[in-house]
Amino acid sequence: MPEPGRVVSDADYRGLLEARVREPGRLRRALTDRRRRPLVGEDGRMLLVAADHTSRGKLAVGGDPMAAADRRSLLDRLVICLADPRVDGVLGSADVLEELALLGVLDGRLAVGTMNRGGIVGASWELDDRLTAYDARHVVDLGLDGGKMLLRVEPDDRGVPGTLELAGRLVTELADAGTMALVEPLPYAKQPDGTLALDPSEDALVRMVAIASGLGSSSAHTWLKIPATADPARVAAATTCPILLLGGDAGHDYERVFTGWETALQVPNIRGLVPGRALLYPAVLDVAEAVGRAGALVHPDHDPLVPAEQEPTP
């Protein structure tokens, strides 16, 4: 994959390292003091860059098992993405969001905090997605624009009921605060060798969308994050909640990925994208080109930094 080169200056990166030692409070203050914006602009669409994979040990991209292991490289790539005005914000763990805020690139952008990252990649308990990152209170108190929870269901896994209960509670707590709950419902299946993998069945995803839509004491602030499928309209018909499509590892077939996104974005309640590795570590494009193409699909005629007339996110 193409290397973007250094974007975060030596001085800024050194300043970040020094702040962690000498002035750690600056990281949180940078996040809470950033300039806020409404959740959506006048087009009602959203493009987030997902940067929460590292917090559950998911570092591999394509054939490189350690592609996302270099933090400075990750920050360089995120800064490139955020230089595009059509990128609404970032989904990340506290370390990533605080670092971006301290670098000054989250002003006027959305910051969505990831919540349950306990399902470490490759662990025997991988589907036991416990709360290890943000909780609902800190999402609200720190002025984040939403909280994201992973909901992976495999019928025989004993950790799944606890994850369902946790997700329902988090949706309720975020809804009570008037804050977006971004739920990622994914069906999983046990393979013959005992490993777990995403179930590619569209029927299974439809079922998961229905389950996720019913979580909590209110669905008023629930958004869903799901994979693109061959028939996105059929999957989206299972809910009225707004949907963002994830990206995954796009490999080398970017034309297929972008065509799929373009088709899916014609469905009324599919409101945008939340790719991660597909934009941050593209195999055949540079980062700016990948994010530019995604931005053109989500916001073809509108600068999302010119928001609609509406109440700011509480």
Image (cartoon, grey):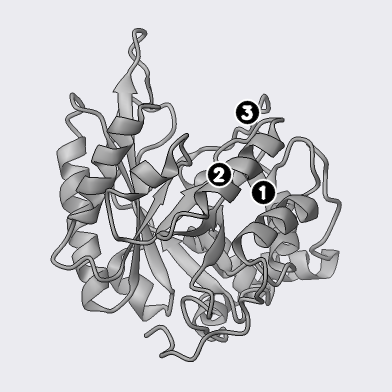
Q: With respect to residue 304, does 65 lie above or below?
A: above
State how far apart marks 2 and 3 are (Cα): 18 Å
Percent x, y of residue 92? 51, 58
Q: Are marks 2 and 1 in contact (CB under 8 Å)?
A: yes
In the rendered view of the protein, which quadrant contains the C terminus?
bottom left
Task: Please state if 18 lies on the left or on the right of 7 as rendered.
Answer: left
The disc at residue 247 is: 2
Q: Is residue 214 above or below residue 87?
A: above
Q: Residue visible at 75% across and 64% down? A: 13
Q: Disc 3 residue type?
A: Pro
Compared across the picture, whether 13 is left or right of 51 comes to right
Q: Of callouts 1 and 3, which one flags the residue occurring earlier in the amino acid sequence?
A: 3
Q: Which residue is mark 1?
A: 279
Q: Which mark is residue 95?
A: none
Q: Secondary structure at mark 2?
A: loop
Relative depth, front residue between 105 and 178: 178
Q: What crowding class fits label 1: few (fewer than 14 Cα within 10 Å), some (14-19), or many (20 or more)?
A: many
Q: Quadrant of residue 97?
A: bottom right
Task: Give the numbered dot on residue 65.
Answer: 3
Residue at point 43% right, 26% down? Answer: 122
Q: Amino acid at mark 1?
A: Leu
Q: Nearer the viewer, mark 1 or mark 3?
A: 1
